[in-house]
Image: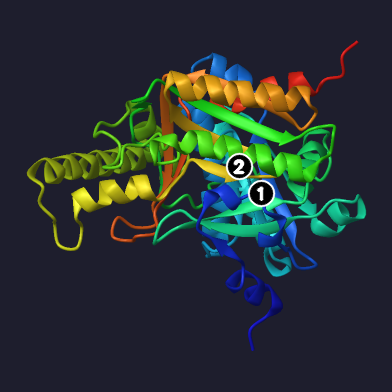
Amino acid sequence: MTSPDEEFLSNLPVFLHFEDVADPMLYRALPEGWALALADIIDSTGAIEAGRYKAVNMAGAGVISGILNALDRHDLPFVFGGDGAAVAVPPTQIEAAREALSKVQSWVADDIGLTLRAAIVPLSVIRDHGFDVRVARFQASDDVSYAMFTGGGNNWADEQMKQGRYLVDAAAHGSRPDLTGLSCRWNPIEATHGKVISIIAVPGPKDDAAAFRDIVSEIVALANEDGRGGHPVPIDGPPLGFIREGLVLEARALSAYRDRISQIRKGAWVLFQTFLISVLYWLRKPAGRFDPVQYKRSVASNTDFRKFDDGLKMTVDVDPDRLKKIKARLEGAAREGVCYYGLHEQDTALMTCIVPSPLSKDHMHFVDGGEGGYARAATSLKAQMQPTA
């Protein structure tokens, strides 16, 4: 007999048009007994100011990879936030998620040199405080869908974590999570229209849900004037070329702690894979079941560049005219009390990936702004939300 938790996951609503993302009728509440496993980088702004964009994103995606691998499933709802992530976990796997989070914390400290804060927040506590966690799925491509969240529970849980509640202790130094599939090889992707902008928009003090849905739809529509939603990755995939920092981070993530021989071996294997893909793409030749041209196109179609996590989050490539319209509409909505927002402009986007297998079609790719992205947008958002003297 199928359990209620499995039925919930298999029956989650899936929508095809991102313009509908703020429609509350699309979402279903998490079942009783679930929890949110979440984490973020402490002082991600400082790391970004030091130019460690790739490392911050690698840590955030590592939270998702570490939990999903430990729980041996990729169907759990999750959201990538740039400098962190959240995963919804069923009751029977909460302790396994806690252990995975503790190991991810250790890995981030040992290999990346950053501090990851992590927490497990029970859904019952979230509901006791008047919030909820409701989930739907957006079909990004034929092979991948991404979870969207509403109900205010994710945001409340994140604030509790930042205040030191429900925290998970880091495992001992040298503890390694299973990060199989975590990849960070792509070079920054240059804007083709003008600017890559990272946007966060959340409901404002007016608390007008209908007006907020309208502003979300308007911003999405403005980004979509290019016909691709403002997608920052070219339709044929990102340009070939792989960043050294990403290769090093990936090799370390897949190696034993401080095992130089293992790191060298893994690094050589990663380099060989990237070289082979480059050659095959240049030749336009498949190797067995691996078609490099199709793979690059699917990288674009599978990319998670826009989401809803108790508010709209997008990293999009827009021309100056669209940027002006988006700014004007957000500024107007903020003045009216419909939303708070943060927006950061940059010249590039960054991609971090989870690729279960080069031959699988369900590879996932997370995009953030290449010069601070969501973290800098969040800083602007928080400043806007501060009460004026």
Residue at 34% from the left image edge and 36% from the top image edge: 185
Whether the residues at callouts 1 and 2 have beta carbons within 8 Å, the answer is yes
Residue at 29% from the left image edge and 32% from the top image edge: 242
Mark 1 lies on a secondary structure that is loop
Label 1 to label 2: alpha-carbon separation: 8 Å
Residue at 79% from the left image edge and 24% from the top image edge: 385
Q: Where is residue 270 in the image (x, y as percent from the top left)?
A: 28, 42
**Height in image: 288 above or below 383?**
below
| Residue occupied by mark 1 | 22
Query: 175 or 167: nearer the eye?
Result: 167
Three-letter amino acid code at the position of disc 1: Ala
Considering only order in the chain, which callout, 2 or 1, is on the residue closer to the N terminus?
Answer: 1
Near mark 2 (Cα within 10 A), the count class, few <14, some 14-19 or many ≥20, is some
Mark 2 lies on a secondary structure that is helix
Badge nearest the viewer, 1 or 2: 2
| Residue occupied by mark 2 | 217
Q: In which quarter of the image is the C terminus?
A: top right
Query: 137 or 372: nearer the eye?
Result: 137
In this view, the residue farthest toward the left is 283
**Height in image: 65 above or below 195?**
below
Three-letter amino acid code at the position of disc 2: Ser
Query: 335 or 387: nearer the eye?
Result: 335
88 left or right of 270 in image = right
Residue 307 is marked as none
Q: In which quarter of the image is residue 155?
A: top right
373 left or right of 40 in image = left
Q: Where is residue 141 in the image (x, y as percent from the top left)?
A: 41, 56
Residue 219 in sight from this viewpoint: yes
